[in-house]
Amino acid sequence: MILIPAYNEGGSIRRVVTEARTKVPGAPILVIDDCSMDDTRTEAIIAGADVISVPYHLGLGGCVQAGYRYAYDAGFHYVIRIDGDGQHDPRFIPLLFERLRESRVEMVIGSRYLNGKVPATSFARGVGIWFFRQVLRLILDKEVHDPTSGFVGVSRQALEVFARSFPLEYPEIEALVVLQRRQFQFVEVPVVMRARMAGQSTITTLRSFSYVLHVLLGVVVNILKYEGKRRKV
Amino acid sequence: MDRLLNIVAGMSILLIGMVFLAIRRAHIRVEYSVSWLSAALVMLILSQWQWALLQFAQFLGVNNAPFALLLIMLSLFVIVFFRFSVIISDLKDANIALTQKLAIIEYQLQHVQEKHPPTDPS
């Protein structure tokens, strides 16, 4: 299943869904509309996607988790997540899927830093990515080239975990720590990321600093988290 | 010192009154009123029972009893606020899970209705 979390992506979602349908014909496409204020839902339906609309804005993590929860309950074995803004090129979906199936790891990350080309990014974001690479290297004992990539594929084992527990805000980095705590494996595959088709990134320069603090705290909390007594909701 | 202690006693009585009124009007659930009532009672007792307050001040190593009372008051409110942060976090988790489940069930229902449209009873 292809999962596309979307919030106010009315300008791009139709193209993203259409491209995904063309590149991966036959794969179910599920858009999770995070209570958008524009016509994201209508555009996604017109393009042929199934749409789950959450009744109030949950944020990226809550929105992605809704998709994982549905996929797990519906019995899917693999889920590939792409963003609704068009940055993730759907022609790489089969690559992620094959890698996920063949390598038998629990997660595959589409990395923009593995193909030799360093894509243009803001200074603050570049520093943030470098910083988290170092932090994750210490925690995971493994290099993660693109820790903020949302272009990921997950197996059923990871789906089971994420359906129950998934970081709510800026989930990509924290999700890696969640996986590591369960001794799950992941690999990165090279992908090319494009510019957004429409809209603006929610992570501005000022927010980058808040992002770093927030994620760092989230990583520490995930390391310390005891989930044995938490009730299953 | 007496004036300050009387003000604290007055505030404690006011807080107890407000909590009871809120319970009566169902603005606060009984289980969540317990924290506030406990904090207000401790403040009331310590402000009117100076021997106990002095013992506390001595225990804390503070020479000034009213200062010790303010310190205790601050600590109690920090504990109450922390308790409510835990409750709010729990509520948020439950809220998110319910929202996700509602959205998924709504989606599944829509699919069922598309497959089996409701028949006209007439």
Image (cartoon, rainbow, N blue to C red):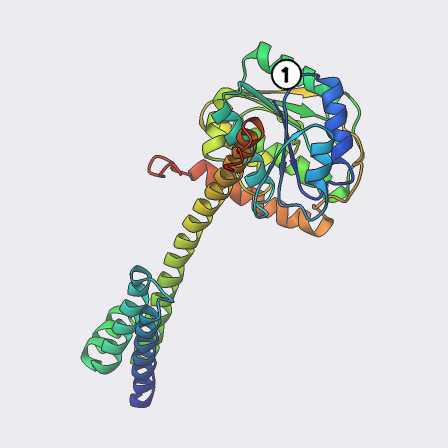
* Label 1: few (<14), some (14–19) or many (≥20) C-alpha neighbours in 10 Å: many
Describe residue A48's horizontal placement relative to residue B23 as left or right.
right
For this orientation, the residue located farthest to the top is A102
Seen from the viewer's position, the closer of residues A66 and A211 is: A66
Q: Residue at x 29, y 60 (%)?
A: B31
Seen from the viewer's position, the closer of residues B82 and A199 is: A199
The x, y position of residue A193, in whole percent, is 76, 28
For this orientation, the residue located farthest to the front is B122
The residue where tag 1 is placed is: A97
What chain letter is assigned to the residue under label 1?
Answer: A
Q: How many numbered tags mark residues here?
A: 1
Q: Quadrant of the N terminus of chain A?
A: top right
Name the secondary structure under disc 1: helix
Identify residue type, mark 1: Phe
Give the answer, above or below, for where A64 lies relative to A57.
Answer: above
Q: Is residue A138 visible?
A: no
The x, y position of residue A53, in whole percent, is 60, 40
Q: Residue at x 68, y 39 (%)?
A: A41
Q: Residue at x 72, y 22 (%)?
A: A21
The x, y position of residue A118, in whole percent, is 78, 28
Q: Is residue A61 visible?
A: yes
- Find residue A155 and report its image quarter: top right
Describe residue A76's horizontal placement relative to residue B53 as left or right.
right
Give the answer, above or below, for where A150 lies relative to A211.
Answer: above
Seen from the viewer's position, the closer of residues B34 and A172 is: B34
Give the answer, above or below, for where A16 lies relative to B53.
Answer: above
For this orientation, the residue located farthest to the bottom is B3
The x, y position of residue A11, in whole percent, is 78, 40
Q: Residue at x 63, y 22 (%)?
A: A28
Q: Quadrant of the C terminus of chain A?
A: top left
